[in-house]
Image: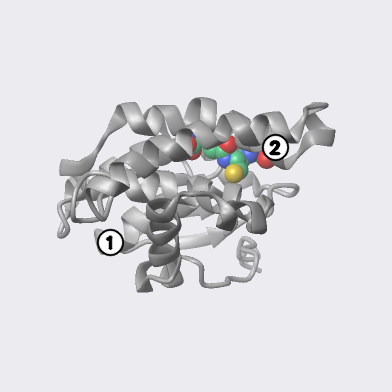
Amino acid sequence: MSARRSRSTRLTEPVLYSFRRCPYAMRARMALAVSETRCEIREVQLRDKPAEMLAASPKGTVPVLVLPDGRVIDESLDIMRWALGGNDPEGWLAGDDSALIAANDGPFKQHLDHYKYPDRHASDPAEHRALGLGMLRTLEARLAAGAYLRGERRSLTDAAIMPFVRQFAAVGRDWFDAQPLPGVQRWLGEQIASPLFAVVMVQRPQWSPPPPPP
Ligand SMILES: N[C@@H](CCC(=O)N[C@@H](CS)C(=O)NCC(=O)O)C(=O)O
């Protein structure tokens, strides 16, 4: 968590700067929703980030959570753990598998980017698809043993990883559907179809600051 404090106008509830399609922001929104943390979600455009967000977190990535006391949390996993630390009705923190999440956020995310954007990275998409498949096989082994990655109940680990697997699957849907990954395919489909995911994927208009008083 950042020690920075935002000097913006006094807030009555946390503000989340978010981008609907960002997988990091998705997982933060899932934890905020499941923990029933009231917050104002401000939808931003990555090409046109609001000055208020950059003042709170100059590194310029979403999600950013600004708390009413001015504290700023600008890493998605920290937002998840903070929200669930306040209220964890489904016991998500008991399923916080930091090693598996690190494998997702590190190598798997890199293969996802090199598979999805070969022009941007001058990469061979087939090579990175094959390397990403290694992670999907790791998930498959978990999901052969239980409905979710940490057993029979969804947890922080499922929410942290699912948005990235969703993106990976969407790059080549026919290829993904043809893989011998029945557990991953079921797990992904169920989470995408879940009421929780529907709630966090609601479309919001782009946020803009209120005009200054006359
Ligand atoms: N480690 C950060 C990564 C967040 C991140 O990289 N978000 C992307 C969007 S998915 C972003 O804001 N990129 C900045 C940009 O595109 O300008 C976290 O977990 O919150």
Seen at 31% across and 48% down, the residue is: 143
- The residue under label 2 is 115
- SS for dot 2: helix
Which amino acid type corresponds to the residue marked 2 in the rendered image? Tyr
The span from disc 2 to disc 1 (Cα, nearest Å) is 31 Å
Location of residue 157 in the rendering, given as x and y in whole percent from the top left corner: 31, 43
Residue in the foreground of this view, choosing between 40 and 204: 204
Q: Can residue 4 be seen in this snapshot?
A: yes
Residue in the foreground of this view, choosing between 97 and 14: 97
Rendered-image quadrant of the N terminus? top left
Q: Residues within 10 Å of mark 1 (few under 14, many from 20)?
A: some
Q: Quadrant of ligand 1?
A: top right
- The residue under label 1 is 34
Which amino acid type corresponds to the residue marked 1 in the rendered image? Val
Sooner in the amino-acid sequence: mark 2 or mark 1: 1
Q: In the shown orientation, is residue 79 left or right of residue 51?
A: left
Q: In the shown orientation, is residue 194 left or right of residue 131?
A: left
